[in-house]
């Protein structure tokens, strides 16, 4: 579940790219991506801000340190978690097991954020006025893209998008879905509270506060002042938004547990095989020198 969907920042680029190991079904593609993660992250970073030579050198050193930490500590943890999830699925999947897996995935995500946070804050503190302007413009562009892609769509189109995203995700894990599973997804999509406008407003508030911090980036303790913005974006949500997010999360958890309960033995076998394949991939990458 997208419990921290409002979280924004350049550091997320690295974390999300690393997270492909938990969702990719293409071993070769994931292996190539991870072993070229420094290049991929640098390309993504260039979409937001152009670093000067000194910043590039510092970024490369910082990222290499983060990458080594991730390879040596996180990939083995991913592999163990994936094997645990595979074992749990042998007798079917319970609602509390899905909830625990989602919580564990979020913990992995936050650990990766935490590990790189100090370097991220230091990089921001070194930005000059031109870079700040460039970064704010890029983040503003992202915000407007979200408005065009989500807020301006009518509810029927948003609902179709939700169904398409979830079906694609579940089919990658279970294989071909049955009609009753497809119907349950459609039911969930119809019950989902659309929060596109609220997300847009919260992201606007987030960007305003982020811009304020960038303006005072050379003052002491930027990392401490920036921390709530990165790790507690819910503080920028409008009143009632948090309650609606929780309701949506619970509906999604209900839907996922019912899809799992409807799973056939063949689908569960497909799920276990995919999880074990990813676990093996993580093991292999953890043992690769890069």
Image (cartoon, helix red, strand yellow):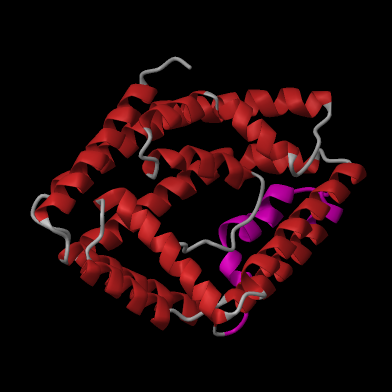
Residue at 40 percent across and 17 percent down: it is 288
Which sits in the foreground, 148 or 73?
A: 148
Rendered location of residue 97, percent (x, y): 22, 59
Residue bounds of the magenta highlight: 213-239
Outermost residue toward the top in this view: 289
Instruction: Residue 20: say if magenta.
Output: no
Specify whether 216 is left or right of 258: right
Rendered location of residue 250, percent (x, y): 35, 75
Which sits in the foreground, 282 or 67?
A: 282
Residue at 44 percent across and 14 percent down: it is 289
Rendered view: 121 above or below 208: above
Quarter of the image for residue 6 reads: bottom right
Quadrant including the N terminus: bottom left
Quarter of the image for residue 46 reads: top right
User: Does the image show residue 1?
Assistant: no
Residue at 50 percent across and 30 percent down: it is 33
Outermost residue toward the right in this view: 129
Specify whether 180 is left or right of 235: left
Rendered location of residue 73, percent (x, y): 39, 31
Quarter of the image for residue 153 reads: bottom right
Residue at 26 percent across and 54 percent down: it is 176
Instruction: Residue 233: say if magenta.
Output: yes
């Amino acid at each position: 579940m997208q419990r921290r969907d409002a979280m924004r920042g350049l550091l997320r680029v690295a974390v999300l790219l690393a997270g492909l190991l938990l969702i990719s079904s293409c071993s070769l593609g994931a292996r190539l991506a991870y072993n070229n993660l420094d290049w991929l992250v640098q390309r993504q970073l260039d979409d937001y801000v152009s670093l000067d030579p000194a910043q590039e050198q510092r970024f490369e050193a910082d990222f290499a340190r983060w990458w080594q930490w991730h390879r040596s500590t996180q990939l083995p943890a991913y592999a163990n978690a994936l094997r645990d999830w595979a074992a749990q699925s042998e007798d079917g999947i319970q609602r509390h097991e899905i909830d625990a897996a989602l919580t564990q995935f979020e913990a992995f995500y936050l650990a990766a954020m935490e590990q790189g946070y100090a370097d991220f804050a230091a990089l921001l503190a070194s930005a000059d006025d031109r870079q700040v302007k460039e970064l704010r413009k890029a983040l503003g562009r992202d915000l407007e893209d979200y408005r065009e892609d989500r807020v301006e769509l009518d509810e029927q189109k948003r609902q179709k998008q939700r169904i398409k995203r979830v079906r694609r995700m579940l089919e990658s894990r279970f294989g071909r879905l049955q009609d009753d599973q497809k119907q349950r997804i459609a039911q969930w999509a119809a019950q989902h509270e659309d929060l596109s406008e609220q997300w847009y407003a919260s992201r606007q508030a987030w960007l305003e506060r982020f811009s304020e911090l960038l303006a005072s980036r050379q003052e002491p303790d930027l990392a401490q002042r920036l921390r709530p913005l990165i790790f507690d974006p819910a503080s920028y949500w409008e009143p009632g938004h948090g309650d609606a997010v929780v309701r949506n999360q619970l509906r999604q958890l209900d839907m996922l547990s019912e899809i799992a309960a409807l799973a056939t033995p063949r689908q569960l076998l497909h799920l276990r095989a995919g999880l074990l394949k990813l676990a093996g991939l993580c093991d292999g990458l953890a043992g690769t020198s890069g």
